[in-house]
Image (cartoon, rainbow, N blue to C red):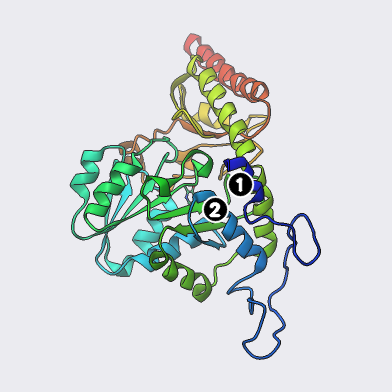
């Protein structure tokens, strides 16, 4: 069955009690039991909830495995994965420009573990191979990366990691299962900030952790209940609703991103465009000053200035002062995150309108610089 059909039908049967075409929101904390321990499979909503369970089944189906646990945020899912997999003094390999929240978890929340964190350019297989050691427990991948959108060879890295007994985790937030199914490439664990494309409407925070094998998944599932960072039934239902249009939305996001990348490439106020050829994100270097960047990002009519990405409404951000501000400036420079890099998350509006909005801003930057040069 094709992805678009699976997203609407697999684990999406009508409600067996009422025939409701769309599963109801089980907005309940607890469940009446027939006698102690005798129940209909649910006893307390931190442990399990029918709406949440349905979402877990649907996400597992889309990533092609059986095991999924959803969490109150992407970082809560990451925390459970790290807690379940790591022991003190393990080595973790991460992309050089790994998401800052992941880096903060590893270096601060797990500070007592005395982990060896090894940032590597994961698009360079030789560098990955050189970094892997007998201490390596996890190779953590983001592909494409944020905000430079660098792609890594998951299959080749999985082969290298497995040869050393390490597990491969792929943060599939940017690509989504529409464009990349990491388990088919050898990943052991997949994590999502569901907040982004999966939910897709910028109206909730949520995460998911999926695993290929029960032995890897069981400790993660245990932590979901034991720590209790679970999402509310309504949010799970909203994600179920979002997933039904995931493929359609991704097609439009990608079409818009690709057309925008083309338009930016020909504009004199742009020196570099980053677009990996698929997916919904596009970044670019503005030929201008920091003041030009500020004016540009603050005055778009259709791109709202904000953190996050992956929603139907277009967003843009200035990573150096927003999403990546916590990285020291010299390290940002070493990572190729310049002060004039702008990240776009085009929504599903019409590409012509989005391009017109961007070009208007770019023309203004160009005109201001010309005026300055002739003054
Ligand atoms: C690639 C990536 N992974 C994980 C996260 C964390 O997810 P959340 O914000 O849902 O906790 C983010 C958030 O921006 C992200 O961009």
Identify whether 341 is placed above or below 163: above
Residue ID for mark 2: 61
Horizontal and vertical percent for residue 312?
A: 66, 39
Cα separation between marks 1 and 2? 8 Å
Circles 1 and 2, Cβ within 8 Å, touching? The answer is yes
- Give me the disc on residue 207: none
| Horizontal side of residue 38 vs 128, given as left or right | right
Cβ of mark 2 under 8 A from ligand 1: no
Residue 304, given in percent of the width and then of the height, sits at 64, 37
Occupied quadrant, residue 91? bottom left
Q: Position of residue 72 (x, y in %)?
A: 57, 62
**Residue at x 73% of width, y 63% of height:** 25
Q: Residues within 10 Å of mark 1 (few under 14, many from 20)?
A: some
Residue 96 at x, y percent in the picture: 32, 44
The reply, left or right, for residue 352 in relation to residue 90 is right
Badge 1 marks a residue whose secondary structure is helix
Residue sticking out furthest to the front: 1
Location of residue 259 by image quarter: top right
Residue 99 showing in the rendered view: no
Q: Which of the 4 image quarters holds residue 250?
A: top right
Which residue lies at the image location 57% right of the left edge and 60% below the top edge?
56
| Helix, strand or loop under label 2 | helix
CB of residue at label 1: within 8 Å of ligand 1?
no
Q: Is residue 256 above or below residue 186?
A: above
Farthest residue in the top direction? 374
Return the disc, 1 or 2, that comes first in the chain's sequence. 1
- Dot 2: within a 10 Å radius of its alpha carbon, few (fewer than 14), some, or many (20 or more) residues? some
- Disc 1: which residue: 6
Q: Nearer the viewer, residue 374 or 185?
A: 185
Question: At 53% from the left edge and 16% from the top edge, which residue is drawn?
Answer: 366
């Amino acid at each position: 069955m094709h992805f678009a059909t699976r997203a609407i039908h697999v684990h999406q049967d009508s409600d067996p009690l009422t025939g409701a075409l769309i599963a109801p929101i089980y907005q309940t904390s607890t469940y009446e039991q027939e006698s102690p321990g005798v129940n209909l499979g649910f006893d307390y909503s931190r442990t399990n909830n029918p709406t949440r369970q349905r979402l877990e089944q649907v996400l597992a189906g889309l990533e092609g495995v059986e095991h999924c646990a959803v969490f109150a945020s992407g970082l809560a899912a990451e925390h459970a994965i790290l807690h379940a997999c790591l022991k003190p003094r393990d080595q973790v390999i991460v992309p050089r420009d790994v998401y800052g929240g992941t880096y903060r978890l590893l270096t601060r929340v797990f500070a007592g573990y005395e982990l060896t964190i090894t940032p590597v350019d994961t698009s360079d297989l030789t560098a990955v191979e050189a970094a892997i050691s007998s201490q390596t427990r996890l190779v953590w991948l983001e592909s494409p990366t944020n905000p430079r959108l660098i792609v890594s060879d998951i299959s080749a890295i999985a082969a290298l990691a497995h040869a050393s007994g390490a597990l491969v985790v792929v943060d599939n937030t940017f690509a989504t299962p529409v464009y990349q199914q990491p388990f088919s490439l050898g990943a052991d664990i997949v994590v999502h900030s569901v907040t982004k494309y999966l939910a897709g409407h910028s109206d909730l925070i949520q995460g998911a952790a999926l695993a290929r094998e029960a032995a890897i998944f069981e400790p993660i599932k245990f932590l979901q209940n034991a720590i209790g960072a679970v999402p509310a039934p309504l949010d799970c239902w909203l994600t179920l609703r979002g997933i039904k249009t995931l493929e359609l939305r991704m097609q439009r996001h990608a079409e818009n991103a690709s057309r925008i990348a083309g338009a930016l490439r020909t504009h004199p106020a742009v020196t570099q465009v980053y677009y990996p050829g698929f997916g919904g994100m596009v970044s670019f270097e503005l030929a201008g000053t920091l003041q030009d960047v500020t004016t540009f990002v603050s005055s778009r009519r259709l791109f709202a200035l904000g953190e996050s990405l992956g929603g139907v409404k277009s967003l843009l951000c200035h990573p150096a002062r927003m999403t990546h501000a916590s990285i020291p400036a010299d390290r940002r420079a070493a990572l190729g995150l310049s002060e004039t890099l702008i990240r776009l998350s085009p929504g599903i509006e019409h590409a012509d309108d989005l391009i017109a909005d961007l070009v208007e801003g770019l023309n203004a930057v160009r005109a201001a610089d010309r005026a300055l040069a002739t003054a």
